[in-house]
Amino acid sequence: MLPPRVKRENVRLFHREITAPQADGSIRNLPLLVALEATTRCNFKCVHCTNTFAKEAPVDLSLELFQRVVPLVRTAHEVYLFGDGEVLLNTPRHLAMIAGIHEQNSACELGFSTNGKLLTPEIYELYCAAGVQYIQISVDAASKELYALMRRGGRLEELRHNLDGIVALRKRWRGTQPQLRMATVISKQNYNELPLLAEFAKQYDFSYWYINAEYPHNPGRDLLRLTAEDVVALNRIREDILARYSSSFLTIFDPSTGLAASAEEPWLKADSPVHCTVPWQRFEMKANGDIKVCPYFHEPICSMPGRSFEEVWNGGEFRRVRQALISGKNPPQFCANCKLGMRWQYLPGFPGLPRPRAALAWSAVRSRTGRKIRALTKLGFGLGSA
């Protein structure tokens, strides 16, 4: 594992590259965020998700590709093991990936997202022992009828049952790691349920709630978009949520919702010489080896198989995107219209940057489940593909 000063220097180098970007689009810093998609298999068909409308057959990240890119995490601030699939469909394989990442960088902020259907207390305990910092659960409604409509394949009662067990487990441990985070995609269908979701987040001791309004691959997206009247109502809802729940959890309304940044989000107001920082700080690889600029620009710009990391990171495709975002000339159409807050990610003032990995509590829990984790890790990538 590299010493912390090397990672801090990579953050400083990123800030220098953003302040004075190179005209040819090349960069010297390594990614601050590495996002690896473990699988595209999923047990849900959510109304806003790319996977619901995909025509390709499901695929798992291969051992060969994982081993090629995992050294990149050594200087990463954050590693995110998620994509368009449900990672808990193959927990042993997922835990093996986490073990491989921690061999390279045990101090990174490591987390993943799930729909929560398979996140039982027993599974949560395994991820606690594995050293995961956060688990983000996607929840788009707090009433069972709307939840079933939006997150097809899931039942709100199942999710509540899992969370009841996790809350009880955390009380016995007297700890809160891994953190529970919540992500919500809002539209005309569900934004009025945000007050109910705020109560849901408080009831289950979530520490963070991220709300956005992006559904770029839904054919009916124009019918889902919030109107000007909706945004006015949404702003009132936000003010009420921030007033009532700011002491319970951090709430971030992404600019894609149409709302201006709040006092809790100063980094979203930071000045940046480039239109978007993402191609300077994020490396995202899909399960099939495709490389994306960002999670919302769904067309891949190149593919990893047969190329080295440097050939991709400073290759022609990435450099052309960076050049367009430096000059403002002919950026990708989605980038030109983008309102997502990740455009400012990792700029000075971004929460917790740089941040060492919090010390894990409950050594007794880790000891009790250690043998189980080691057994599952051996099962994981020893299987090749799932």
Image: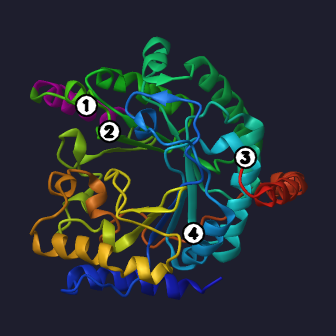
Q: Residue furthest top?
A: 145
Q: Is residue 315 above or below residue 272?
A: below
Q: CA distance from mark 2 to mark 4?
A: 31 Å
Q: Give the x, y percent position of residue 173.
A: 76, 44
Q: Give the x, y percent position of residue 187.
A: 28, 28
Q: Amino acid at mark 4?
A: Cys
Q: Amino acid at mark 3?
A: Thr
Confirm whether residue 273 shows in the render: no
- Please tell me in which quadrant of the rendered image residue 185 appears: top left
Quick one: 287 or 86, which is closer to the camera? 287
Confirm whether residue 117 shows in the render: yes
- On residue 91, the disc is 3
- Please tell me in which quadrant of the rendered image residue 236 appears: top left
Mark in the foreground, 2 or 4: 2
- Write down the residue under mark 1: 221
Q: CA distance from mark 2 to mark 1?
A: 8 Å
Per the image, label 3 sits on a secondary structure element best described as helix
Query: Quick one: label 4, few (<14), some, or many (20+) residues within 10 Å?
Result: many
Q: CA distance from mark 1 to mark 4?
A: 36 Å
Mark 2 vs 3, N-terminal side = 3
- On residue 271, the disc is none
- On residue 108, the disc is 4
